[in-house]
Image (cartoon, grey):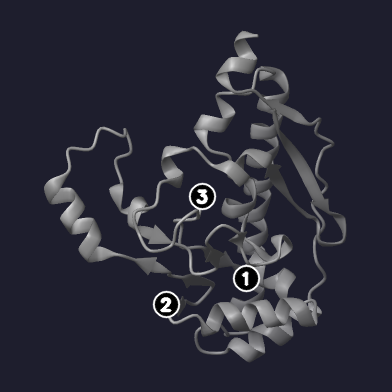
Amino acid sequence: MDKICLERFDSYGYARYICTSCYHCESKMGISYCSIKMRGCCSYFPKFELIDIHRMVKSAEGLNVLNRIIDNPGTVVYSYYIHAKGYFDKEGYEKYIKTNDDDSGIKDKTIFFRACPFVKSGFGCTLPPVYRNYVCNFFICDEVMSKVTDDEIKERYVRERERFVKWAEWENRSLEAILSERHINLRNNLEECIKVLQDVPLTIFEFAQLKELSVFDTDEKEA
C-alpha cells in the first residue's frame, strides 16, 4: 500500500506532496518513448516564477540551483519568470503519430517524447524540493488519486493545493510590482533583481496539517 503525505519546509513557507507510488509509476502520463526512461510524469518543462526565484536567492544552495537553471541550454529568461525547456524527440513523436492509432486517452501525445531537463532516469528530479515550482511539488496524477478511498481527506489535499496556488499568484504579482517600480526585470537586469529579492523578506504561507492518505491498488480495495 502506498501513501500520500505533506512535507513542509516551514522556514521557506513552502511544502510538497510526497507520493510513494511515484517510485513504481504506472500512470499513462509516465510512459516514455524517448531516450530518458523511468522519468515518471516529469515530461513537463518547468516555469520558475518570482516566488520560486525569491526562495532561491536566500541561500548559496539556492543561488547555485538558479545558476543551474539559467545555464540549462533550453532555458529562456523572460521579464518576470524563467522557462526551462528540456528534451523533446520531435522525430520520434512525428513518426509515432503517423504510425500509431493510440487510444491512451491522453490528447497531448508529445508528453511521451518529452522530459524535464532536470529529471534523471530512475531517480527523478535532481533539483532540491524546496526550489521546485508548485506544479512539480503538488501534482498527483488522476490514476493515483482514483485509488484513494478517503474522499474527505483527499478533498482537503485538493483544497490546500488550490489555497496555496491562489496565494502564490498574489505573491508573484506583489514581487513583480516591486521590480517594476524599480524599472528592472529578469531578462535585462538579472543581478539587480537578485539583489532586490534578497532584501525582500519571505512571506510565509502556513500550510494546514494534513493526514496521510492511503493509496490502494485494485486487489487491496477488493480485499
Depth-wise, is mark 1 or mark 3 nearer the camera? 3
Q: Earlier in the sequence, mark 1 or mark 3?
A: 3
Q: Residue furthest right?
A: 11
* Residue wearing tag 3: 40
Q: Residue 31: horizontal and vertical position, in percent?
A: 40, 46
Q: Are marks 1 and 2 in contact (CB under 8 Å)?
A: no
* Whether residue 186 is visible: no
What kind of residue is marked 1?
Answer: Ala
Name the residue carrying label 1.
177
**Is 5 situated above or below 151?**
below
The answer to whether 203 appears left or right of 214 in the picture is: right
Q: CA distance from mark 3 to mark 2?
A: 21 Å
Which is nearer the N-term, disc 3 or disc 2?
Answer: 3
Q: CA distance from mark 1 to mark 3?
A: 36 Å
| Eye-nearest disc, 1 or 2 | 2
Q: Are marks 1 and 3 in contact (CB under 8 Å)?
A: no
Q: Are marks 3 and 2 in contact (CB under 8 Å)?
A: no
Quadrant in which residue 62 is drawn: bottom right
User: Can residue 127 be seen by looking at this rendering?
Assistant: yes
Placement of 54 over or under 191, stated as above or below: above
**x then y, percent, for residue 185:** 55, 82
Residue occupied by mark 2 = 74
Amino acid type, residue under disc 2 in the picture: Gly
Q: Is residue 189 above or below residue 121?
A: below
